[in-house]
Image: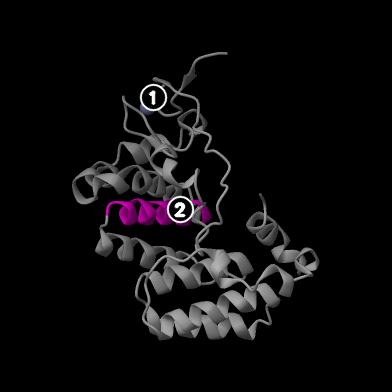
Amino acid sequence: MTQQVCGVCGHPCRAAFRAPQPEIAPDLDMRPGEPARSTLRDWIQVCSSCAAAAPALADLPAAAGPVVKSDEYRLLSTTSLEETLPFRRWALICERLGDRAQQAEALLQAAWAADDAAAMTEAATLRGAVAGLWADTTDVETGLRRLDVMRRAGMFEQGEAWAAELAARQPDELARAIVGFQRARIAGRDIGRHLISSALPPPAHAPHVSHGKRATTGFWSRLFRK
Ligand SMILES: [Zn+2]
């Protein structure tokens, strides 16, 4: 196998990390269950030479170079919680390369890292940024994840308004169950973490899971994957 190198500076780097398959249900924001969950810190590689950050340094395009060398990128190391830094760096690269979807995932992962470091304010700030990036989503899964992100950021009024909007989109039974669960948590001013399984009706009451709307099939199949 040939030695992999950083796409920005050419310094040798490791092969990208591959997280183990989760065996436990994900959180409502789709943070995977264990054993994948606790490998979060391995998800982003940081180049020891140029400080580029990405899930796979070897896959970084040359266009990431100017971002990595920018003042804003370097300043992140002085303004960010250390545990969130790799994810924030990757998020900035995604932003500058025009990949909003990946930027949002990176910032949500940064929020999870902040959760793990018990940095509540930082986690809420990051979730607020994710909610903003997902503000105009029409995707069912992303819409449900945004609802959880808002609730966990303490954005209760905006979260309730978003829940009402999702409910008006006539979601399928499982999505309705999740929206209902979130609205009850919002009413209780609960910013805690919940497993997606706790929001779903018992399997016996959801016999047609596999016949769900096409748009959500991948989402649900991932939930019920063993
Ligand atoms: Zn490098």
> Is residue 112 magenta-colored?
yes
Report the residue at 25% width, 41% height from top.
74
Disc 1 within 8 angstroms of ligand 1 (CB) = yes
Using the image, tell me which numbered label, if any, was put on residue 172. none
Quick one: label 1, few (<14), some, or many (20+) residues within 10 Å? some
Report the amino acid beneath label 2: Gln
Using the image, tell me which numbered label, if any, was put on residue 103. 2
Whether label 2 touches label 1, CB < 8 Å: no
Depth check, front residue: 133 or 154: 154
Q: Which residues are magenta?
A: 101-117
Rendered view: 192 above or below 162: above
Report the residue at 72% width, 65% height from top.
215
Quick one: label 2, few (<14), some, or many (20+) residues within 10 Å? many
Marks 2 and 1, how far apart in space?
A: 22 Å
Horizontal side of residue 7 vs 49, given as left or right: right
Residue 106, given in percent of the width and then of the height, sits at: 43, 51
Horizontal side of residue 177 vs 50, given as left or right: right
Horizontal side of residue 61 vs 138, given as left or right: left
SS majority, magenta = helix
Nearer mark to the viewer, of 2 and 1: 2
Judged from the image, the secondary structure of the residue bearing numbered disc 2 is helix
Query: Looking at the rendering, in which quadrant would you find the N terminus?
Result: top right
Report the residue at 42% width, 86% height from top.
187
Dividing the image into four quarters, tell me where ligand 1 lies.
top left
Judged from the image, the secondary structure of the residue bearing numbered disc 1 is loop
List the residue tagged with mark 1: 9
Rendered view: 216 above or below 164: above
Residue 163, given in percent of the width and then of the height, sits at: 53, 81
> Is residue 168 magenta-colored?
no
